[in-house]
Amino acid sequence: MEAQSGRSNENVVINVGSLCSLKVELSDACLSMPLSYCIFKTPTIHFRHKETSFLPNCFSIEPMHHGKQNLLATEKIKVKYLKALRVRVIGSRYETMSEQSKEIEEQNVLSDWIDSVEMIKEEASSCYAGRDFAAELGDEFVKTMLLDGVFVIELFRKDAEVVKPEPDDPIFSMSSMLQYLYHDLILLENQIPWLVLDLLYEKTRLPCETKSLIELALMFFANTFTSHPPPINTSRFKHEDIKHILDLLRSSLVLPFQESEKKNESSWQPIRSITMLKDAGVKFMKAVPELDSVLDIRFRDGCLTIPSLLIQETTETIFRNLIAYEQCLPKCQPIFTCYAKLLDNLIDTTNDMEILCKREIFDNWLSPDDATQFFNNLYNDTFVKEFYYSELCNKLDCHCKRMWPRWRAYYVQNYFSKPWAIAAQIYAVVMLVLTVWQTYIKN
């Protein structure tokens, strides 16, 4: 087909075949993301800022990193955990069985677990964005889900002392192993669907086990955000559709934050740094008693109350993966991302960090420079449409625009900051009173 341009009289050739092909591609393309997607490959825009915050060190807990050379050594630990669980489920009668009976019973138990995972493999596979691992890997996908699922459940049981770890268990005899797991289990692209964990937990749960899987998981990660974690309240998860471990940790912060008081959603509101707020007369206080969520920052009567936050090696990992998760998950409220953006603005220099550490609001295990740099780089290439701290920022802005708090803060910081300055002020006041008194007596 040919057409002529009215301005240049040049012939333009249109490839009808290409247009038809494009039309077919557009009609076949699925432009919406399935709501079942909850485990994602880390977006490049986030990955490039800190690659180590998104990659597992020692343990692969899903098919995305399964088989990588640097993660193969720990696969033997998973097999060992599976064997030990199988013996425990069979029970005390295991010791009195013949070798043939043991083998038959072990095979029956294992077959039951495999069949159970087989029944949900399609649903589990639908959690992974852009990949159908059930179709790609077949039986290997079921094997991976079983081994990884049992490993995670047994890890939680041993950590909570529901099951006593063996003396030669490398995870509990080598402190570095647990540290690796605190990192690896919270990665966005290293998650196993919660429905797999829940199924295997109920299949292997003994009558003496009273704690729920949610409780065991939260106990394992109790010191992720604070050195003084609040009591675990599993009732608030009753109606929640937990997707995986990272989603559970997010829910443990977001749900109590949403329950505490109504939060107004608005566009981003600028906020001053801690040092600037201090100069404007704002006081800072650690939330006591500990609030249910580190997200619950409040401002009242000139005092900014901030829940205690533990800053350690895994803090950047959990922050970055929660932000990436909220950015990827369809219809997700970016509440944690707003919290990170708020901290990014409050903490601008090491002086801001030191003020919060001095008031025991931040329990910083890193150097002041490293911790400050972490917060300064946290929000790069991240977007929020709704900002959940707009009311807080408005209150702080109104306070800072008032002159009296600023003058009062200036006077206190400059004339009452040191003992000799206080003494000089008292002396000046006494002399002023005496002078006025003498003048009054003479008259």
Image (tube, rainbow, N blue to C red):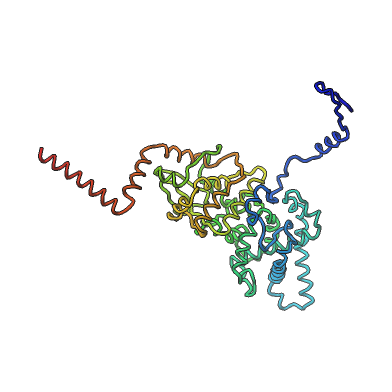
In the image, is 2 to the left or to the right of 365? right
Instruction: Note whether 83 is above or below 28 in the view shown.
Output: below
Q: Nearer the viewer, residue 74 or 8?
A: 8
Q: Nearer the viewer, residue 3 or 101?
A: 3
Residue 89 visible to the viewer: no
Residue visible at 78% across and 75% down? 101
Instruction: Note whether 292 is above or below 408 in the view shown.
Output: below
Residue 116 visible to the viewer: yes
Q: Position of residue 113 (x, y in %)?
A: 75, 63
Q: Nearer the viewer, residue 255 or 359?
A: 359
Residue visible at 10% across and 40% down? 442
The number of numbered discs placed on residues in the rendered structure image is: 0
Residue visible at 64% across and 65% down? 155
On-image quarter of the N terminus: top right
Instruction: Note whether 381 is above or below 195 in the view shown.
Output: above
Q: Nearer the viewer, residue 140 or 359?
A: 359
Q: Position of residue 162 (x, y in %)?
A: 60, 67
On-image quarter of the C terminus: top left
Residue 63 occupies quadrant? bottom right
Residue visible at 81% across and 57% down? 138
Residue 142 occupies quadrant? bottom right
Q: Position of residue 300 (x, y in %)?
A: 43, 43
